[in-house]
Image (cartoon, rainbow, N blue to C red):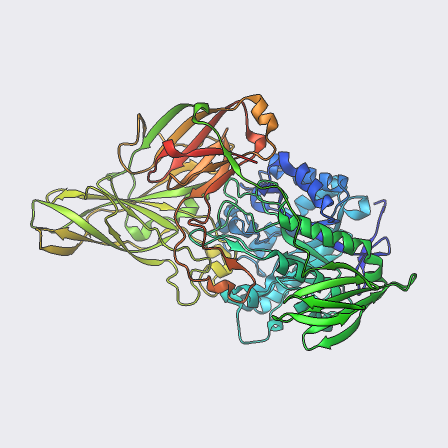
Amino acid sequence: MAYQGVASFDSRAITLNGKRTLLLGGSLQYPKIHHTQWNNTLKLAKECGLNFLDIYVFWNVHEKKRGIFTFTEEADIFRFLQMAHQHGLLVMLRLGPYICAETSYGGFPCWLREIPGIQFRTYNDPFMREVKRWLFYITTLLKEKRLFFPQGGPIVLVQLENEYDLVSKIQLSKGEQYLNWYNELYRELAFDVPLIMCRSSPEEVGEFCSCSKEPELSTIASVETCIETFNSFYGHKKIADLRRRKPHQPILWTEFWIGWYDIWTSAPRKRSTEDVIYAALRFIAQGGAGFSYYMFHGGTHFNNLAMYSQTTSYYFDSPIDEYGRPSFLFYMLKRINHILHQFSSHLLSQDHPQVLHLLPQVVAFIWQEHSSQQSLSFLCNDSEQIAYIMFQQSMMKMNPLSVAVFLENELLFDSSSGYDWQIPFRDFKPLERAYFRELKTFQLDIPIPPLSSSCDFSQLPDMLSVTQDETDYMWYISSATLPVSSKEFTCEKVLLQIEMADLIHLFINQQYMGSSWIKIDDERFANGKNGFRFSIEFENSVYPQPVFSSNSKLYVSILVCSLGLIKGEFQLWKGATMEKEKKGLFKQPIIHFVVKHSELETETIPLSFTSSWAMMPLSIMKDHQSAFVKEYNIKNVDKPLSLGPTYYKQTVIINKAMIDALKWGLVIDFSSMTKGIFRWNSFCCGRYYSIQVLGKERDPSLRNSPVQEDHLFKSTQRYYHIPKGVLQERNELEVFEEIGGNFMQLRILFVE
């Protein structure tokens, strides 16, 4: 190999060709940004003062079926890396293959769980064999494209595994053996750039599987020879401990959490701009050598990218919003990034700053450049109170959790008073109904017994083994009787005890009875929660109330809906590993009818199942490579005749001048609908779910974080993104709706 550069490190910083380099970066996830928008995002990254990117590699995107690889459009990682290089951006490539990233299965392809004897993320031969095969394949391609720094490319750091401290207590000694295996694999792969491994901060975000009364460092996150980094809300709180354990390495903050992800049924999460600015400057002041804003542009969970519970939007309160527009935070970060780069020689001339403790929680860090002897000072108020202090001949009034930056006596930036930046007002402009043309509506049949293949419930196969996560939907079908004396009876209420993942819709005799509109818990087994077990009442769900005959069988049809695969072990029960992920019904449900005999008399009667059970996938495909609805039992109707699965095809005309004038694309307001998935010109834009926010109590997993929940919003997500790159003059919108809604009130809006 003809070396064109050397990436290394010393105790203070990453060194490139022997020169210390301050890394100010941002996290971008290429499959979540439409490929036609990549250039805009990279241009904004450079404008904001970033000099490197943190990029996860998505195995679940590139090898959805074993041995069949995809590297086109949003999956063209090589083009994305080449474009980053053209914009002058370095890259920290996080190969995983476990990446978390709020993506389905944490980045693992679904087929991996089917390999006999496999156990994820531990010293397990079947697992390590597949990981090694994938990593050698992708690394070979990266080298062929000459994308590593020694080849003249942008990749200066490589990460293997991810936040292993969250599972190391499950794996114990096998976990340490597993990480050492990665270290050997790193040598075999011969990246010729430094290896990093990162540690999470469970004390800040409450992943229960790793919480313990034991010290944090009883968990294992890295091997001795690599650079250990961390993910956190406040990087400066990690510095002292990491310096004590690894004094030979620089302090790098791989994920600077500037916000948090949203989950269905919870209020949107926010972090204040002031707090983000404080955390950034406070970390650099104390000796941080680099960080990555997580996320810099979160984007959208197209196709089946979203993990369990995660909304389709991945805004993350980031400097670039979901649609690609720079936010107020963008302009504030731009100011501090350019200051830090301008005076990076001051920061990197010394190994440690001079530290002055001025008040109990007010401290100054002073860095001096060798050549000019100029000092760059950071005055930090770490208290929750306003502080008044004389510093560098200035009387400072410092807000709680704030930082002021001085060059000698000149005030360069004061986070207590730097928030007067004005950006244009943002809004959406509706597309007039005149542009909506042909509409076709199809009702899907509710399957009932008898079916060709049925068996005892305990013999039903695992749902994911059948669907391979290509569809979210599976029917479970059986028949039952109800021992009731009346010839006809009205069902006033249905009581359901069920073990399932993730949601269900119940139909009796092809009539809709109700849905499990439950609070979605990110950590559904933590803090005494029910996990997969639910007791649900369906009351007044449908009008008029269903009337049944006592002499006939009752056909029970349950549509199970997945909300995405888990992103990590902590979303399962304590001690579980990721290959244990499952969807569907796990036990035969217990169903009671509350039957009305007269005005005053009601009776609660259990259903008695009289036949075997059958499963039938409802093939609504979550990609843009195949037909959307692979179902034959559908009928064209003028409008839906009953509540249940419905498929809409709407033609939308947008003239070329309107498309050319657009910069950011469209959104659809799905508030008139219920839940489903949609495509635009065969591009799968993701799931929609219009349920209102349930409950006003704060998510306990965020109790130690600076993130707040905004309960002014009625639903977690109302608007759903359609990238400009998929628009044409004649467009086809396809919507699969699970239950019902008013499609005629659906709105399409321009992003302004």
**Residue 699 seen:** yes
> Residue at position x 72%, y 72% from top?
389
Residue 10 percent location from the top left of the image? 81, 63
- In the picture, measured across the screen, residue 717 lies left or right of residue 61, that is left
> Residue at position x 59%, y 45% from top?
321
Residue extending furthest toward the front: 395
Image quarter in which the C terminus is found: top right
Q: Nearer the viewer, residue 186 or 373?
A: 373
> Residue at position x 51%, y 40% from top?
303
Whether 418 is drawn above or below 133: the answer is below
> Residue at position x 81%, y 44% from top?
152
- In the picture, measured across the screen, residue 392 lies left or right of residue 310, that is right
Give the tally of numbered discs.
0
Residue 237 percent location from the top left of the image? 66, 69
**Residue 623 seen:** no
Residue extending furthest toward the bottom: 360
Q: Nearer the viewer, residue 110 or 213?
A: 213
Residue 392 percent location from the top left of the image? 80, 68
Whether 120 is drawn above or below 48: the answer is below
- In the picture, measured across the screen, residue 429 lies left or right of residue 21, that is left
